[in-house]
Image (cartoon, grey):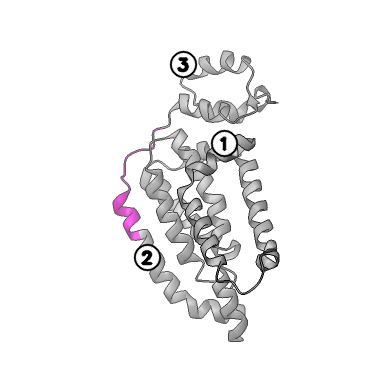
Amino acid sequence: MNLAFLRALRRERFFQLLIIVGIALSLFVPFAPRAWPDAIDWHTIITLSGLMLLTKGVELSGYFDVLGRQMTRRFHTQRQLAMFLVLAAAALSTFLTNDVALFIVVPLTITLKKLCAIPVNRLIIFEALAVNAGSLLTPVGNPQNILLWGRSGLTFAEFSGQMAPLAVMMMLDVTAPVLVLFSGQGVTVSYWNAFAAVAAPSGVELPGIICRFFLPRLSSGRSYGDWCWWRPGLLCWRVG
């Protein structure tokens, strides 16, 4: 575990740069190093760590894989799928804050890369822009709005009403390029990638009986998602 952590830390050049800059800035700090822990907002650190653990747990549970397959069947083109995810990210950011919305949408988007051919990196950029645009609308959308709302003396509705024109303009600026940069090609799902997406998480294994029932369903023309949906009892997980 420690060796894996050190190897991962060695690859994080930006994090190493932050450590060096932090050490350099600490030379100009007027208080002693023993007082440094008190300068950290531990409540925020714990909250973000909990969100990351929760998101990773949901990802390893396979729920994002199931949800991703449902989405690829519901939206027939890359443009429709990208627009839905961008709008969903913006909507979530209005009441969950922009960073929490990304914790939910980005892992789901990465899962789609395992299921179908879609420019994931480009889509994540637009999702990041969308959460910043959507979070403008409400007082709880981002920390800056919370601060402004507390000092303005406005009600929730009054604050949202004043921010609505700017939020709408920014959302138009975000969604308009989506219509151009994402093609109208159909979303083609790879059944083998879909199966690998389910079996890939570490510590989770599928019994061989799934392959015995899975392959004939492919040859009969039924999709893997339909097979999983109507036969959940066959998916017997063993957590190692």
Q: Which residue is mark 1?
A: 66
At label 1, the amino acid type is Val
Q: Which residue is mark 2?
A: 172
- Disc 3 marks a residue whose amino acid type is Ser
Q: Estimate the x, y position of residue 218 in percent, counting from the top left.
A: 48, 19
Q: Secondary structure at mark 2?
A: helix
Q: Residue at x 47, y 64 (%)?
A: 132
Residue at mark 3 = 219
Q: Which residues are magenta?
A: 176-188
For mark 3, does the 10 Å Cα neighbourhood hold few (<14), some (14 to 19), or many (20 or more) residues? few
Asked which secondary structure carries label 1, the reply is: helix
Secondary structure under the numbered disc 3 in the rendered image: helix
Seen in the picture, residue 197 relative to 15 is either above or below; the reply is: above
Residue found at x 59% / y 80% = 149
Q: Is residue 21 left or right of residue 235?
A: left
Q: Position of residue 23 (x, y in %)?
A: 55, 60
Q: Look at the image and tell me in which quarter the C terminus lies.
A: top right
Q: Is residue 213 above or below residue 152?
A: above
* Amino acid under disc 2: Leu
- Give 47 or 162, whichever is nearer the viewer: 47
